[in-house]
Amino acid sequence: MAALRCALLSVAGIALAAEEYQRKLPAFPLRTSGRFIVDANGTRVRLHCVNWYGAHLPQMVANGMNYRSPGDIAKTITASSFNCVRLPFSLDMLGNFTVPQPKVSLAACPELQDSSPLEIFDATVLELTKHGVMVILNNHISTRMWCCSSSDGEGLWYTAKYPEDAWLDAMGFMAKRYQDNPLVMGFDLRNEIRPSGLMWPHWGTGGKTDWAKAAVSGAQRVLDSNANMLIIISGLYFSIFLCQVPTYPVHTEVPLLGRTVYTAHEYNWFNFHLAARKSIEVYMVIVAAAFPMSWLCRQRCVGQRCQRCRCRCRAFRCERCSSRCSVFREIEPCWEFSVAALLAALFALSLKILPRFLQSCDFNGFLVAITCGFLTPICALVSAVLWMRAAFLVIAGRMERSEALQLEMSAAVALRGESPRRDNHCSFQPQRHAKRCRSMTCFLAIVILITFGALGYVWVEFGRYQAFEQELDFKWGFLLSAPSPVPVWLGEFGENQESLWWHHMIRYLQERDVDFAYWSVNGEKYTGVPESFGLFMEDFVTVRHPWKLAQLQSVTNRSD
């Protein structure tokens, strides 16, 4: 009975939340004013969205309908304080295709199992908007598959299968299809523009890879079919960079004037400073582990080697015995330490100057950054190998010299009285070796302290919120505070752990008052495969990470 009461209260709460959001619907159509999206009355409209994906995948329907109906999922979304959904689709979905396994992917929606993918998409849009959820259409990809990589052939807005004209026709077709539904209020023209083979996208340069030019053409098709839609335009290189927008500000021209929202994507692997910080952590752990590992390795083998040396030596020949037992006596590890330290310094320096090339925001700058990004880990790897080799040599040399010195001292005792010259020579050897050992130890300690100190400084600096803030400001945040600001919508971001990146991202959203769409609301990535970034479990009821939902709600529930 108690469980039933809780279930009824939960259902009632969801229904009340849906009604509350319906009462808060803006006056359509939406437009832009400065950096904000506003309704027909000029009132600010915040887009606090989630991505609900699946229709662009081989299954061709949004995930979750094997557990719950679209209407129930819409209620869950509104009850979680979100007011819009970004719905990805593929161009394949518009063709003459059928759902591959409808009884599996639509197990909770038997009435839809005989429908086409497009009809199921229609039903999904209808249920969302019936519950007061605004919808942003997103052409995620052309051929149905997971997105995105540089090798999938889908980096640009056209492919061999779907040329540019087919993409433009699809934009007009989808916009017209929902022209009578004002809650379908935005069109995200294409997801994560990026290199496709040898073709790199550009902004405002003309030619076949000019995304700015193509976006204007796509926007014109959308607005010709549905003049009430906002046009959402992705940045370049996986939607990371909008820094080239000022060179060709398409939002200042008709038909995009007052209708354009730019979109960016952010994930922890997109953030240079935090990714570099992680590489420093790995590097320092490897180098720190090199010394005890070298000691353990030599501990096992040096005794056997020196034991064989003793068997061959004679007590009265201390010089010969010492040279045989001290295998590494003539090998000085100074150059290994020097080169390792130099490469470590280059590693740290490269991490500091690499953002300078990225901030050039042009093709040449990106090429230099990619080259540096390739060489930097090589420097780190070679440096780590040299640290390990140097540590091995020092530890091995010290252990073998200790064995040799013991033999020399024994020989000196045995020869005492027989040969004063040889006795003096053997007694001098321990002092000379001890002095060299102390010098090498001091040199090693200084080099390690300087190297680790420099890397530690970079590690601390790269972890500060200020570095995170400056990086996002350069990539796209500057548009929010430019002399002529324009809206930027964070169309994708997500995380599966409460990381430093996540805390910085939430802080940035709060301080900059950024509209967003979390990736994703899904419980599944594919049917039967959990989505670790998802807000909910597979049942679309249980919250996967309560801390995540609570922190997102702290952003969505903020007051003006």
Image: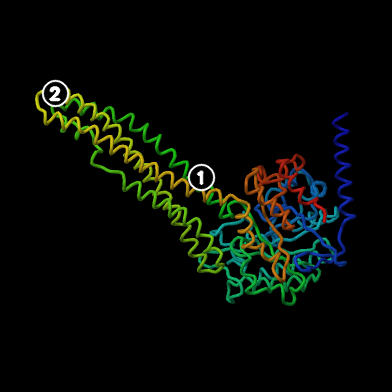
| Residue placed under numbered mark 1 in the picture | 281
Query: Which x, y percent locates residue 91?
Result: 67, 62
- For the residues bearing labels 2 and 1, Cβ distance under 8 angstroms: no
Q: Residues within 10 Å of mark 1 (few under 14, many from 20)?
A: some
Image position of 281 (left or right of 1): left
- On the rendered image, what quadrant is the C terminus found in? bottom right
Q: Establish if 5 lies above or below 358.
A: above
Identify which amino acid the numbered label 1 is placed on. Glu
> SS for tag 2?
loop
- The one of 391 and 417 positioned closer to us in this rendering: 417
- Packing grade of label 2 (10 A; few <14, some 14-19, many >=20) is some
Q: Position of residue 400 (x, y in %)?
A: 27, 32
Q: For the point 50% across and 60% down, which residue is it?
A: 353
Where residue 123 sits, quadrant-wise, is bottom right
| Residue found at the very far left of the displayed protein | 418
Q: Nearer the viewer, mark 2 or mark 1?
A: 2
Provide the residue designation for mark 2.
416
Give the mark nearest the N terminus, 2 or 1. Answer: 1
